[in-house]
């Protein structure tokens, strides 16, 4: 089942279903099932389908039986706000993995997004989450953005008193709000949750007059939702009921995967995720326009290294770096930039050497007058002084 694309895509960094060119990709020539799902996603930010597996009922029953003893039921009954979940049961349960990697479902997602989907996390719930409504984009985002979605499937009929799934149609099309929008600075040493965004989400729902919908799901009903759709769990009013379900989160290939809630990109802090492809069990590389991110960059970003503070090559004291790091046999500056920073190795600026004139006291005009070749070359006077003048014993003033 493949949607026929007769037109080129000048904005491939936007999911097809959210693209300004939506009508090019989803029209009368599109498979009717795909077209129906695409329309739901486009208009509402979610689509309701029957899970495409003829053996679904058997697999659902097997999952419930296999995972039942994994939950602390007594602790939950004493404090239901704690919730019950098993994350990544796909690693030990073939039926959980089978639902997450269902081929027809993967084909549907590829048609909607225009890129190959990658299941990277499963969550199995025996009861309702009772979560405040939220956008997954603060937890799971990508560059380019919006290449993430979730699929929730009911493993049994869901009663209204069991805390069914809730969502706000149309909110998927809003801007993705991150730390910058709520004027919040992230401290990597502090534990944080999505609670910091709740006031903003509540205000947005109110100002947009959003109507809350509840998913009255039967066993085998599935809901595909876009990353930015506001969704959550209704309060569970009957604690004797269960609400067995499975959630699978999907990223898409050729993206960088990160957590905005734990990031401040313009301070050098980007919490890039290392994710595992459920289909293969192997780690999925973070890619940007077909090029894999270097491991050192990922680690630097997680540590919040400010690239504005990295010593530029013309002020890098290679002589001292070599003396302090005798094990380094490669290009010294490349080692410093790619490995030394992450490893915590110290580096120094030439401009900080004793007797080196700092920029604020350096007379550029006098230096150029004393060194006519530098003036003719057009090179910045102080840059030449740091990079060459000191070692060449250049005059600072004309004689």
Image (cartoon, rainbow, N blue to C red):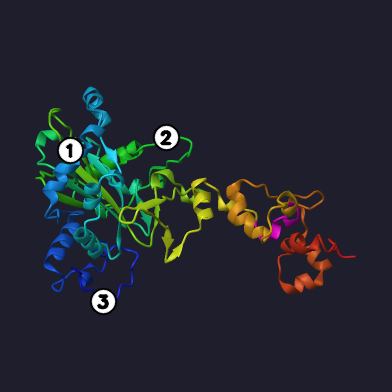
The span picked out in magenta is 312-320
Taking the magenta stretch, the answer to whether it contains residue 390 is no
Residue that appears at 19% across and 45% down: 167
Image quadrant assignment for residue 277: bottom left
Q: Secondary structure at mark 2?
A: loop
Q: Can you identify the residue that label 2 sits on? A: 191
Q: Secondary structure at mark 1?
A: helix
Pick whichever of labels 2 and 3 is earlier in the sequence: 3
Q: Which residue is at the front of the view, 342 or 39? A: 342
**Prevailing secondary structure of the magenta residues:** helix
Residue that appears at 82% across and 50% down: 355
Q: Quadrant of the C terminus?
A: bottom right
Badge 3: how crowded within 10 Å, few (<14), some, or many (20+)?
A: few
Taking 192 as reference, is 355 above or below it?
below
Image quadrant assignment for residue 377: bottom right
Mark in the foreground, 1 or 3: 1
Q: Can you identify the residue that label 3 sits on? A: 7
Residue that appears at 34% across and 49% down: 140
Whole-percent x, y for residue 45 in the image: 21, 54
Image quadrant assignment for residue 287: bottom left
Rounded to the nearest angstrom, the CA distance separating label 2 from label 3 is 47 Å
What label sits on residue 65 in the rendered view? Answer: 1
Q: Secondary structure at mark 3?
A: loop
Rounded to the nearest angstrom, the CA distance separating label 1 from label 3 is 48 Å
Viewer can see residue 140: yes
Badge 1: how crowded within 10 Å, few (<14), some, or many (20+)?
A: few
């Amino acid at each position: 089942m493949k949607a026929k694309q007769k037109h080129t895509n000048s904005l491939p960094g936007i999911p097809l279903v959210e693209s300004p060119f939506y009508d090019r990709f989803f029209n009368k020539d599109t498979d009717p099932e795909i077209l129906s799902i695409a329309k739901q996603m486009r208009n509402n930010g979610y689509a309701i389908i029957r899970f495409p597996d003829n053996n679904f009922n058997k697999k659902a029953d097997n999952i419930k039986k296999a995972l039942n003893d994994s939950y602390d039921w007594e602790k939950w009954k004493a404090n239901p706000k704690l919730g019950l979940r098993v994350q990544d049961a796909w690693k030990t349960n073939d039926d959980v993995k089978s639902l997450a990697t269902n081929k027809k479902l993967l084909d549907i997602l590829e048609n909607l997004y225009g890129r190959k989907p990658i299941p990277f996390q499963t969550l199995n719930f025996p009861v309702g989450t009772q979560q405040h409504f939220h956008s997954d984009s603060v937890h799971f985002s990508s560059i380019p953005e919006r290449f993430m979605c979730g699929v929730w499937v009911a493993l049994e009929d869901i009663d209204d008193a069991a805390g069914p799934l809730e969502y706000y149609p149309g909110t998927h099309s809003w801007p993705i709000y991150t730390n910058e929008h709520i004027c919040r600075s992230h401290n990597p040493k502090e534990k944080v949750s999505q609670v910091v965004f709740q006031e903003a989400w509540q205000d947005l729902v109110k100002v947009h007059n959003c109507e809350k919908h509840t998913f009255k799901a039967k066993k085998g009903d599935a809901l595909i939702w876009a990353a930015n759709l506001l969704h959550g769990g209704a309060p569970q009013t009957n604690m004797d009921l269960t609400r067995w379900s499975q959630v699978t989160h999907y990223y898409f290939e050729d993206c960088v995967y990160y957590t905005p809630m734990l990031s401040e990109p313009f301070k050098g802090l980007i919490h890039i995720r290392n994710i595992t492809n459920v289909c293969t069990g192997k780690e999925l590389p973070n890619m940007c326009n077909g090029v894999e991110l270097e491991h050192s960059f990922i680690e630097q970003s997680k540590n919040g290294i400010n690239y504005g503070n990295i010593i530029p090559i013309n002020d890098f004291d290679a002589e001292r770096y070599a003396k302090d790091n005798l094990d380094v046999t490669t290009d010294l500056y490349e080692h410093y930039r790619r490995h030394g920073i992450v490893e915590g190795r110290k580096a120094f600026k030439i401009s900080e050497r004793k007797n080196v004139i700092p920029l604020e006291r350096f007379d550029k005009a006098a230096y150029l007058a004393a060194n006519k070749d530098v003036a003719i070359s057009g090179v910045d006077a102080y840059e030449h002084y740091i990079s060459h003048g000191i070692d060449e014993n250049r005059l600072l003033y004309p004689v």
